[in-house]
Image (cartoon, rainbow, N blue to C red):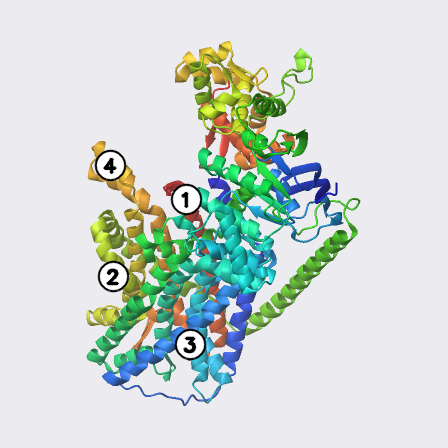
């Protein structure tokens, strides 16, 4: 009897969301205004050698970059996750950040960020390096932080009571309880984060703006150089190198780490992760969308189980007479502190909001109505492309995923392959797809849809596969016994069963597609530039021509549209699927 | 005798997620003296675990004082250790590492820590399992580790929070006996034990003083001094007499035999909620009573169903609301309606429940509320605050969901999960 309530709850926009939007606007402003200051001519041109030996070096460099970014993400994620789980004050701020942060297409910030950081470090490549690592961090941090937070929230109350009774310090609680409890989700999410990192790495390493190329040595820049020269052999070698790197990491790092982390699982907890590892993870990851309602449910069950107060620290009712004096004082002080903190924060928020929006307004003031129209139109076009890409991916991935998932044998064969394909950064294949269509004389406006399909189809396939592999044998048997034909099987069993997973696949795929649109709508090949109308190309072009008003407006519109879609359409679909079609195990 | 721990005028309330404030404890006075086993006995939701956590300093009461040796307690209680129902062992630590968890924070030397662990492992009979991991152990052995961990802290008060409830009957029995032996032997620094339980047998076999708690809100109903010599023989007449007394008190608490006299015209004006039990389990209960000849002792029924006596009482109370059973003293007997109900097929049963439900005050009020709603469809989320106003001391979601469930079964109310609407079905 909780379905409708949850949907209502989920669609509510909270004050914290508004706060996050303000902060996002500030970031856009900061990035754009720093970029504006960049007037120098960039001279740190790096020459890329297409030889095999050099490729080894580039792979190593990219690898190190990925690891550094991951280490930063991991530490920050632990900090944020811990803060959010342990303090309701930080929880209110951090959770909306995690939710919105993971859905914002950060790649849109790349050009601005690069220019901004280069203006700070004009003579070294360090600006590019920092920009690259920063972007990777912003792509990796959310799911680790959320996994850690969720896992901390799920630790049974008694363990902390034991810790308190035993007088363990915060640090030893962290080491002995918090970290071990979260070991498995942390390991899996690290795997996902690193995989996501490759996507950004390959894009960030090499960047062409207004005829100038910005690059730092690495696999990504190797690929772009190979493309520029039209060197087919080098292109394939680059792809192979990436593949080898991913497979090696999978076997040498992830498998041992994950099986080691199994040591820390809690007894009765079923080890679903081992059955459908990567896939079930993707699924859970996007459940972040549901955190508000699940949090409430969590609290509710906790209340029922332990009769524990929800607000222990809040000053409760009027108790002046019987309270010992010191406790009363403490309450007052606490509430005063809490109050001041809140007021200060609110004031700060207002000042920030006014300042930011004032500045942004002045920045975008010179834009004409037709330019705003162009932004809106481009956004709509990109939206249509993503929509089309999702439909195309679904058409083949839905039936194939169901069929593979229905057979345990096929599932076992495809699992490890999936884990590796999912880690492969799709931008490396984009140019190949483009070339294919280019040779058929098809405009980028159309072929970019297929480029998006390349990136997004896997998410749909994996999730559907996970869903259909979890259809219970009892359901299958009962359908068999009732002698239902294949049509009924699909219509009444398979499709409804995988629907929640399909929605998850769509959400993940759409999120990736907005990011990919930045790369898919603006391509360079053989010294020529190919573009089509879309918000991705608007952003890239605006940066290239130094049209900062257009850049900030386009960024704002895109971020706004994506957040809005997430908060409305996707969230609604997700809840609908979860409440209507989720088979309870 | 000087008191180790004291609660003075303790009230505690907490917020439900629906925003409703539930009073968990009301005006609790309690003291713990040396050399006693104090039992807090009560149905779930009577706040006994909350009470324990307040004593342990894990939560601060909304109102009232906690005194340790006469001084107010404002941190975690340094004299208390707890054994939890689900043992709360860290699965990635071996038995000895789990026990060492708290001992290490005492600032002892490594040798002393090892010494102490060895001692408690010996005391609770865990030799040979020092390096085992919790997942390799049976439920009873795990609970021994929990006990060893608590004893290793060498504190004067041991709290057992339903520590035997998750174990099977034999294991629980054995562990209880060993604990008692350990306590009587005075080999440890342990002075007193506080046991939280809903099991009457357990309370009587261990407790030297038994405090019976009542629900809504949690208050002390009765304090029983239990002087039977240890170890206690559960088959002795004296033991049975104490058990029976407590059963009487509990039954009287949940299903009062002689409610205050109400004039016949107002007989249904008091609003009583349907206790939170499933329709189907209540019907199974009726069938079981019929099998036993139509009259059963509630306690026998509980042991036959191997479920909690208090839950049986709740089921009896629910069926009594519908006039299907009568509950004189500790007995539950079928009424004529109850007999006809058992004989009827499902449709006849539904009809009977339907007719009975119409006489319930809470159902009548709910009907009026639904009829006053837009298009006679009441939204679940709108019904919630109304329910809260009607029965401010009860968990409104639970009450509402139970009412809807019984209403659905008797086809008197309908509920659409998609829209969240409650409507009248066969109340015409």
| Residue depth check, mark 3 versus mark 1: number of the one nearer the observer | 1
**Callout in the foreground (4, 1):** 1
First in sequence: mark 2 or mark 3? 3
Question: N-terminal of the two: label 3 or label 4?
Answer: 3
Q: Do the dots labelled 3 and 4 sit on one chain?
A: yes
Q: Where is residue A47 in the image (x, y as percent from the top left)?
A: 32, 88
Q: Upstream in the sequence, badge 4 or badge 2? A: 2
Q: Name the subunit of mark 1.
A: B
Q: Name the residue under label 3.
A: A132
C-alpha span from label 2 to label 3: 28 Å
State the CA–CA distance, disc 4 to disc 1. Answer: 35 Å
The residue labelled by disc 1 is B138
Q: Is residue A75 left or right of residue B215?
A: left
Estimate the spatial distance between the alpha carbons at disc 4 and disc 2, rounded to whole Å. Answer: 29 Å
Residue A82 visible in the current orientation: no
Q: Residue A477 carries which label?
A: 4
């Amino acid at each position: 009897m909780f379905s409708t309530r949850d949907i209502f709850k989920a669609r509510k926009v909270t004050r914290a969301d508004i706060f996050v939007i303000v902060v996002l606007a500030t970031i856009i402003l900061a990035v754009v205004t720093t970029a504006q200051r960049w007037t120098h001519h960039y001279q740190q041109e790096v020459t890329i050698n297409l030889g095999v030996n050099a490729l080894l070096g580039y792979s190593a460099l990219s690898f190190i970059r990925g690891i550094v970014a991951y280490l930063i993400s991991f530490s920050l994620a632990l900090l944020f996750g811990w803060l959010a789980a342990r303090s309701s004050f930080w929880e209110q701020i951090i959770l909306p950040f995690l939710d919105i942060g993971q859905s914002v297409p950060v790649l849109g910030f790349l050009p601005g960020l690069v220019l901004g950081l280069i203006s700070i470090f004009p003579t070294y490549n360090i600006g590019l390096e920092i920009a690259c690592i920063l972007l990777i961090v912003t792509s990796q941090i959310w799911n680790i932080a959320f996994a850690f937070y969720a896992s901390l929230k799920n630790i049974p109350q008694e363990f902390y009571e034991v810790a308190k009774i035993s007088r363990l310090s915060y640090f030893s609680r962290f080491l002995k309880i918090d970290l071990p409890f979260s070991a498995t989700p942390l390991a899996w999410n690290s795997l996902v984060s690193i995989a996501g990192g490759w996507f950004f790495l390959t894009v960030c390493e090499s960047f062409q703006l207004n005829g100038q190329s910005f690059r730092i040595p690495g696999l990504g820049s190797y690929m772009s150089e190979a493309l520029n020269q039209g060197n087919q052999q080098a292109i394939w070698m680059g792809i192979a190198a990436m593949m080898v790197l991913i497979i090696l990491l999978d076997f040498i790092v992830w498998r041992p780490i994950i099986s080691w982390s199994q040591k820390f699982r809690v007894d009765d907890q079923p080890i679903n992760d081992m059955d459908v590892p990567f896939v079930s993870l993707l699924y859970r990851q996007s459940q972040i969308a549901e955190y508000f309602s699940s949090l409430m449910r969590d609290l509710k069950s906790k209340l029922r189980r332990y009769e524990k107060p929800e607000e222990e620290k809040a000053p409760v009712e009027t108790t002046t007479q019987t309270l010992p004096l010191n406790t009363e004082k403490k309450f007052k002080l606490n509430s005063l502190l809490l109050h001041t903190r809140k007021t200060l924060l609110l004031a700060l928020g207002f000042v920030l909001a006014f300042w930011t929006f004032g500045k942004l307004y002045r920045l975008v003031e010179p834009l004409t109505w037709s330019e705003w129209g162009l932004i809106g139109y481009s956004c709509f076009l990109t939206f249509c492309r993503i929509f089309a890409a999702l439909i195309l991916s679904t058409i083949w991935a839905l039936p194939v995923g169901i069929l593979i998932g229905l057979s345990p044998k096929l599932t076992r064969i495809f699992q490890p392959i999936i884990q590796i394909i999912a880690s492969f950064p799709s931008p490396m294949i984009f140019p190949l797809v483009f070339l294919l269509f280019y040779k058929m004389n098809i405009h980028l406006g159309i072929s970019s849809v297929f480029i998006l399909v390349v990136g997004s189809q896997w998410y749909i396939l994996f999730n559907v596969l996970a869903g259909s592999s979890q259809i219970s044998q009892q359901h299958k048997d009962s359908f068999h016994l009732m002698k239902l034909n294949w049509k009924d099987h699909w219509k009444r069993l398979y499709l409804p069963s995988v629907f929640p997973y399909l929605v998850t696949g769509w959400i993940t795929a759409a999120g990736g597609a907005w990011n990919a649109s930045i790369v898919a709508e603006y391509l360079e090949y053989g010294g020529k530039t190919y573009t089509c109308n879309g918000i991705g190309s608007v952003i890239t072009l605006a940066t290239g021509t130094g049209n900062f008003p257009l850049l900030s407006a386009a960024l704002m519109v895109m971020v706004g549209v994506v957040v809005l879609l997430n908060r409305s359409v996707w969230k609604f679909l997700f809840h609908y699927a979860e409440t209507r079609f989720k088979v309870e195990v | 005798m000087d008191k180790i721990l004291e609660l003075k005028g303790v009230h505690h309330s907490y917020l439900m997620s629906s925003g409703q404030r539930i009073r968990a404890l009301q005006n609790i006075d309690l003291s713990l003296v040396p050399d006693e086993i104090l039992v807090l006995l009560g149905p779930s939701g009577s706040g006994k675990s909350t009470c324990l956590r307040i004593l342990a300093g894990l939560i601060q009461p909304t109102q009232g004082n906690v005194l340790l040796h006469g001084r107010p307690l404002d941190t975690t209680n340094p004299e208390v250790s707890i054994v939890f129902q689900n043992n709360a062992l860290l699965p990635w630590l071996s038995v000895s590492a789990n026990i060492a968890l708290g001992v290490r924070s005492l600032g002892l030397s490594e040798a002393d820590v090892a010494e102490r662990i060895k001692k408690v492992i010996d005391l609770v009979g865990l030799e040979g399992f020092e390096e085992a991991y919790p997942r390799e152990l049976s439920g009873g052995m795990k609970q021994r580790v929990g006990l060893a961990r608590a004893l290793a802290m060498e504190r004067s008060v041991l709290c057992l929070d339903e520590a035997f409830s998750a174990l099977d009957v034999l294991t629980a029995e054995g562990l209880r006996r060993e604990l008692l032996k350990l306590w009587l032997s005075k080999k440890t620094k342990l002075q007193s034990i506080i046991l939280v339980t809903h099991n009457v047998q357990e309370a009587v076999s261990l407790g030297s003083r038994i405090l019976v708690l009542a629900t809504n809100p949690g208050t002390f109903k009765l304090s029983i001094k239990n002087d039977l010599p240890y170890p206690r023989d559960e088959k002795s007449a004296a033991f049975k007499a104490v058990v029976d007394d407590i059963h009487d008190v509990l039954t009287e608490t949940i299903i009062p035999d002689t409610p205050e006299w109400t004039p016949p015209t107002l007989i249904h004006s008091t609003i009583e909620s349907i206790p939170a039990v499933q329709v189907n389990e209540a019907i199974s209960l009726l069938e079981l009573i019929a099998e036993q000849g139509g009259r059963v002792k509630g306690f026998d029924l509980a042991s036959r169903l191997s479920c909690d006596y208090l839950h049986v009482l709740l089921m009896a109370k629910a069926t009594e609301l519908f006039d299907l059973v009568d509950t004189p003293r500790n007995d539950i007997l079928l009424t004529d309606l109850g007999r006809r109900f058992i004989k009827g097929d499902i449709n006849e049963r539904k009809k009977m429940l339907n007719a009975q439900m119409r006489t319930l005050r809470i159902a009548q009020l709910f009907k009026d509320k639904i009829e006053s709603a837009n298009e006679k469809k009441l939204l679940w989320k709108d019904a919630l605050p109304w329910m809260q106003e009607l029965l401010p001391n009860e968990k409104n979601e639970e009450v509402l969901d139970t009412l809807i469930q019984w209403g659905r079964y008797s086809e008197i109310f309908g509920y659409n999960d998609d829209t969240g609407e409650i409507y009248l079905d066969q109340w015409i």
